Amino acid sequence: MEYFVQQSINGLTLGAIYGLIAIGYTMVYGIIGMINFAHGEVFMIGAFIGVIMFTVLGLAGFGPVSVAIILVLLVSMVFTAAYGWTIERIAYRPLRGSFRLAPLISAIGMSIFLQNAVQLLQGARVKPLPAVVVGSIELMHADGFSVSISYIQILIISVTVALMVGLTLLVQRTSLGRAQRACEQDLTMAALVGVNVDRTISFTFVLGAALAAVAGVMVAMYYGVVDFFMGFVAGIKAFTAAVLGGIGSLPGAMLGGLIIGLVEAYWSAYFSIAYKDVAAFSILVLVLIFRPTGLLGRPDVEKV
Amino acid sequence: MPAAASVRSALESAFRSAALGGIAALVLAVPLVGLETLDTPQGLGIAMRWDWVAKAVAIIVLGRLIIALWPAIPGTHLRIWVGVGLVTFIAIAADWWNGRPFRVDRLVAGLAVGLVLQAIVALRARFQSRNGREAVRSPAAIRLDRWLAVALIVCAALLPLTPLADRYIIDLGTTILIYVMLGWGLNVVVGLAGLLDLGYVAFYAVGAYSFALLARDFGLTFWECLPLAGFFAAMFGVLLGFPVLRLRGDYLAIVTLGFGEMIRIVLINFQAYTGGPNGVRSIPRPTFFGHPFTDFPEDGQVPFHQLFGIEYATFHRIAFLYYVILGLAALTFLFTERIRRLPVGRAWEALREDEVAARALGINPTNTKLTAFAIGAMFGGFAGAFFATRQGFISPESFTFIESAMVLAIVVLGGMGSQVGVAIAAVVLVVLPELGRGSVAALPGMFPEPAATVVRVALGLLPDFGIDLDLGRIRMLLFGGAMIAIMIWKPRGLLSRRDPSVALKVPVRAASGAGGQ
Amino acid sequence: MSAPLLSVEHLTMRFGGLTAIDDLSLTADRGKITAIIGPNGAGKTTVFNCLTGFYKPSVGRLALNHEGGEFLLERMDDFRITQQARVARTFQNIRLFPGMTVVENLVVAQHNKLMRASGFTALGLIGWPSHRRAERAAIELAHGWLERIGLVDRANDEAGSLPYGDQRRLEIARAMCTDPVLLCLDEPAAGLNPRESAELNTLLRDMAAREGIGILLIEHDMSVVMGVSDRVIVLDYGRKISDGTPLEVRSDPAVIRAYLGEDYAAGAGA
């Protein structure tokens, strides 16, 4: 029982991170109907920028940890958002209205490019990050097994909740969010009624990249290592989360992320840690077979 | 026409786009280019590379300026000279920036390359004006292509017999042919059927491991395993494709991407059978129909050299492997050329062009796509079996995403659907890093003399930014970038031309007839 | 008396809360042209989408009868409807295979026939004579249709390079190459000039008479509708409001009301 609770806490932490990345996939898919294969790489870049910033602050002897974390999160969000914006401008915008495979191939090209660029610029080796947040709270203790939640897990879950609340307000209350929802319904109609479609799409990429950056920084703090290839598997899992929740749906992405995180934690705990990456993939295939619209998604009606 | 005003507005927008590009490049470069993480004994350190940032920004600004101004330059000839002039200028400026002396040969190279380009353009213009533009190539042109293909195959077949052939060349040729075959196989899926398979390496792995394990556990030979390897790979293709091919095309892309990675994880962890990360060793080498290539045959075996009464040489085995893959590649070529002209091939293309319309014509979308997917997988399996017997050793490390990306790059750059384009792209992408194993400076040394001078002169144009351009290390970076660029500028690939699968023989009625649009 | 070629009974199609077609019944016969007209959004194209299997109707029975037996279209996959029930269609916004040549477009349409002749690819790969014969016959059929629509000259050009009117005719010929008994044409005259539209009238009459197929026609161009139709069905908000010969429908007050509003209907009635 205690073991189960502990795994649930770990799973929720992981799930929060997958959910944050999944939002980027789901928003882009909702608005331009394509899988942004480079999104996993955006997450990886966010993590790298986070590690670089922590290292710079550490070498400069910057004092309070809480301020440092906020600073690093903000800096990583800004720079990673710039990457998101540029990726859309270079690789996707010129291809709107091109043949069906063109944006997908361009996206995978961008993914390969970014992975290798980071490998060449920062080296192929795993980059370590010393623990920034240490310590934990013991929640339960029974039969010689203690259940605890670490401060970093609390940080990850609370930051995610805060971001979700912020995102919901942004999408529902602001004019940019309204424009975004309009574009999701119908790009052409939105343009006709005066929504600046280009800017809305750019905004979507920026927003998705900023959230992925937060996920990246938090993963770097949680696991203490980053490498140039980390975006690949994380990207597939987050995409699975988006599909599971119903692609195009924001709450769905978060829900999907949590489920994937929990399944992965239980799978590793009770079944096989070596095959933990296979768990998410099996879910992806199962969802596509039995419920391609996901848990909270709407079926899309084909227009003929 | 108000020329001055239009020039000014073109300039204005070009500079605006260049400035925007510069700002973006600066923001992107500051954290990842400007700051480098270093492994030090005390943990992570940081090195600063602000000069790299400055160079990156300069390249982006200039590049965007050129791209923006390009359409405004009137006339092809002027464009050639502006382009060549710019490259020359950048090369000289880079020398100056890095404090190296001025080199006259850069000017010479610029002049020479410019003249050659101009000659090519002039020749092409003459050729085209005689030929006219046709939507469909004339039968003569198609026949010429056929002969070209035959000539190429004959050359490839004769290669091991020429004095040029040494171990290195034939090995390289074998590697190229593996990728040519993989490219043609994937081309069925991506180029003809329009399905994006991002995990093609998985089928390559299935083929390789089927052969390795069947040979190890059941003692089957290469020739017995080859069809089985293709069959197993095709079965995997069907199992994977069946649930996904009913859905939108993008899902197939992500599922294959995931599958490519999952099969690697399974291979690593399923130690009892696959040997895990250590792989499978001592996979049997192919024999010449039962006659091994060895100096020390087992009892009762007649080795290849005794069969033909020649002296033993390791080269025989290498040449034989080369012929095997040449044969397999040729089979792939003939098969795909043929099937493209069959109803199923036309249905693939129809589904690629417009799935809704194809369904309305009574084409079963799932089954038709599934055949393309399975056939592509089958050729991947064949190539995998060959790979295993060639290496004699396989491990999961040979089947990473990089391999899938490389084969996809070959298909995309070669022009989706074009067989010749894919072959040329495979040659370029395999040879390119091979050339760069040393560095670019060693390039002229790779060629015999008259060609070496040409290469040396042309290299005078290559700017030296003081960064070692190791083509082997940056090749995936180049491939990724090239895939984006191709999609934007030439989505049908650099060399793609589609020959129709059937033609109606029509008596040409008027000279001005069908060609014009 | 034999059963009609197509009989639609109580067809209803709902999207969420919206009822696009409401309890529609109609029939179509061989050798006859039946036009479906109605204001924009009346549900005309949705009827076609239900008939050809792109949508699964919420309620209704769609029965098609030919020598091969009776087919219940609402239970069949879209491609099987073309393959077995022999219903073909064209699209409101032309859907050719633009990168393939004109003649290839017509040969693709004979897919199922050619698949069988090529032994589902196996015989075709080894160049079996039955496949070669079938392919020659397919090209001949395509040739015949190209002559009828006047596009022999462009046979080997990319379909996407044809002018608009030619693309419309090619799409009709392509649908005919599937050997249908019922052809559904979605606004075939849209975007045609008067001369082309007159040619289209001749072609449709000719097809109904010579091939003996039934044609269902959605059209806004009244010169086409009144010129070729044997029967006209008028839809409004997903319901059938009138059904009869062109002459009867033209003077039906319900139709005038739907098209021109209440006042006109009252005025016309007076």
Image (cartoon, rainbow, N blue to C red):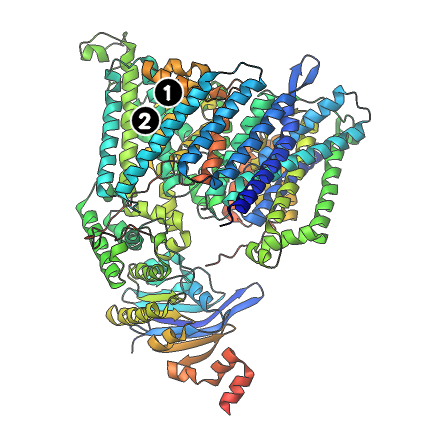
Instruction: Give the label on residue B225, or none.
Output: 2
Could you say which quadrant of the image residue C30 lies in? bottom left
At 39% from the left and 19% from the top, the residue drawn is B455
Using the numbered discs, state the Cα–Cα distance from disc 2 to disc 1 in whole angstroms.
Answer: 11 Å
B443 on left or right of C118: right
Secondary structure beneath label 1: helix
Give the answer, above or below, for where C174 lies relative to A273.
below
Residue B82, image x, y percentages: 46, 32
Q: Percent x, y for residue C199?
A: 30, 69
Asked if residue A40 is positioned above or below residue A183 in the image, the reply reads: above
| Vertical comparison of B212 with B417: above or below | above
Residue for point 62% across, 25% down: B54
Does residue B94 appear to the left or right of B127 in the view shown? right
The amino acid marked with disc number 2 is Cys
At which x and y percent is residue B9? 56, 44
Farthest bottom residue in view: C270
Name the spot of residue B25 as percent of width and height, x first: 61, 32
Q: Are marks 2 and 1 in contact (CB under 8 Å)?
A: no
User: Left or right: where does residue C68 sit relative to residue B88?
Assistant: left
Circle 1 is placed at which residue position? B216
| Category of crowding for the residue at label 2, using alpha-carbon neighbours closer than 10 angstroms: few (below 14), some (14–19), many (at least 20) | many
Q: In the figure, C106 relative to B378: above or below?
A: below
* Amino acid, disc 1: Arg
Disc 1: CA contacts within 10 A as few (<14), some (14-19) or many (>=20): some
